[in-house]
Image (spheres, grey):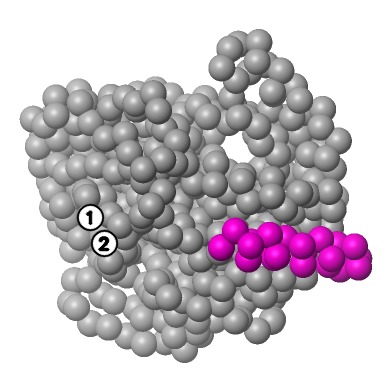
Amino acid sequence: MLLIETVDRPPSAAALFLKLSKKPAPAWLDANVDSEKLGRFSFLAADPFLKITAHGHNITEENCLSGKRTKHQSPFFPFLDKLQKHWHRPKESGFLPFECGLIGYLGYELGHQVETFAQTTINDLQMPDAFFAAYDALIAIDHLTNTTWLLASGLPEESKSSAARIRARRRLDELREIVAEARLDETKTVNLETIKPKKTEQITSAEGSLETNFSYSAYQSAIKKILNYIAAGDIYQVNLSQRFATPFSGSHQEFYLHFRNLSPTPFGAYLETGKHCIMSNSPERYLLINGDYIETRPIKGTRPRGATAQADANLGRELLLSPKDRAEHIMIVDLERNDLGRIADYGSIHVPEMQILESYANVHHMVSTVTGRIRPGKSSSDCLFNSFPGGSITGAPKLRSMEIIDELESTCRGVYTGSIGYFDFSGDLDFNIAIRTAIACDNHLYFQVGGGIVADSDPDDEYQETRTKAAAFLKALMTK
């Protein structure tokens, strides 16, 4: 069963978020731009009935209503499949892509459960390999029609039972209270949403407090090793990254609101897992499943925005015509076609958009769309398993690239270059690639940036590119 109602005079998403964030395990899947195509729906939730935390094959299932914890020994993707089938509910609204289910993340290190190779990186932040919370009540926002709905499914009570209806009604009442309180605070929230950055956003005085897990010389040395692997024919490309850290004791919620407004994206996310707060500002879709339709949208190739309209157009054109960027992009599209081919009907793989330009507040990206039809008998978890992690943030060939990443990067990536999104109990899902993602933990803010290393990469240029990308995070910290 599903109870659903429209909200009259809906508050802003930010106002709703600030109210929901006071409850346990708040989550916001935040479409902040492009309502006609990628960013139509946002979803907000809190106070789940179930939480799932995975460290390797050690999985903890916590019943949030009773407090009972159950331990499991299982690879994560088969466990996720069993969980979805246990709580399976067909869609009822007919117009919302997500009605009830899981919100959370798949950490990059789950790739070790997909491809068998030794993990040598250190999980110094103690991040779970995966974290999901099961939500029976949601606030859904359609940005195209400017409509907001409250939803309640009655879970974990048995579907269509009187207990489920009673719980769903109570949960709707709770959401109505959230909406009413958010309306009262609307003026304050609008002020938060319209914070403007200062005109000078470089790594200046803040750089003294910026720590990294790579020195300049070590990063250059790692790139040279990759270039040697390429010359030897091991690989064509590897995505190498470094992690930055800076002291941070401010409000996670206010930081995220500021972060998202500096550069709106269609696949933003905010999650609280307990020890860690995850704030993502990603423009990239990893995987969408709607029925038997499957889609991935790899990004490969970036240019900054120009200071004038003409300079901006020239930079976009330069990206689309760049032989280097086009070659890298085609490699990743072919990799993604191969990944989807593992679970798609023969002959169904299609590339309806090839090397198109998408422009955001600070950058131009080269993007393609790869689609297919899922083979009968293949579950959504099978699709995740056979394509994880996304090829745009590993390299080609994928397995050898991942081995080299593990060899050269000292610490676990955690959620970075993993995926954040929803897994509806019907089996539909939508996940981003967790780039431009910050982790707040132990009074520090951690963020990781990198780039694709290919045969003609210059080590110094690649290092400077990571510093430039790091500046985007510092901009959010320095312009309050």
Res. 416 visible in picture: no
Horizontally, residue 130 falls left or right of residue 259, namely right
Residue 83: horizontal and vertical position, in percent? 44, 72
Please check the rendered image and state whether residue 233 is part of the magenta-colored stretch, yes or no: yes
Where disc 2 sits, the SS reads loop
Question: As rendered, which of 211 and 112 lies closer to the eye?
Answer: 211
Question: As rendered, which of 45 and 263 lies closer to the eye?
Answer: 263
Estimate how packed mark 2 is, as few (under 14), some (14 to 19) or many (20 or more) residues with alpha carbons within 10 Å: few
Q: Amino acid at mark 2?
A: Asn
Res. 260 visible in picture: yes
Q: From which residue to which does the magenta span run?
A: 215-234
Relative height, residue 182 to residue 449 (above, below): above
Relative height, residue 409 to residue 98 (above, below): below
- Residue 443: assigned label: 2
Q: Are marks 1 and 2 in contact (CB under 8 Å)?
A: yes
Question: As rendered, which of 273 and 63 lies closer to the eye?
Answer: 273
Tell me the residue that label 1 is attached to.
Answer: 249
- Looking at the image, tell me whether mark 1 or mark 2 is earlier in sequence order: 1
Residue 131: horizontal and vertical position, in percent? 40, 67
Identified at 66% across, 36% down, the residue is 302
- Residue 401: assigned label: none
Q: Amino acid at mark 1?
A: Ser
Residue 175: horizontal and vertical position, in percent? 17, 44
Estimate how packed mark 1 is, as few (under 14), some (14 to 19) or many (20 or more) residues with alpha carbons within 10 Å: few
User: Where's the C terminus, which quadrant?
Assistant: top left
Identified at 14% across, 24% down, the residue is 187
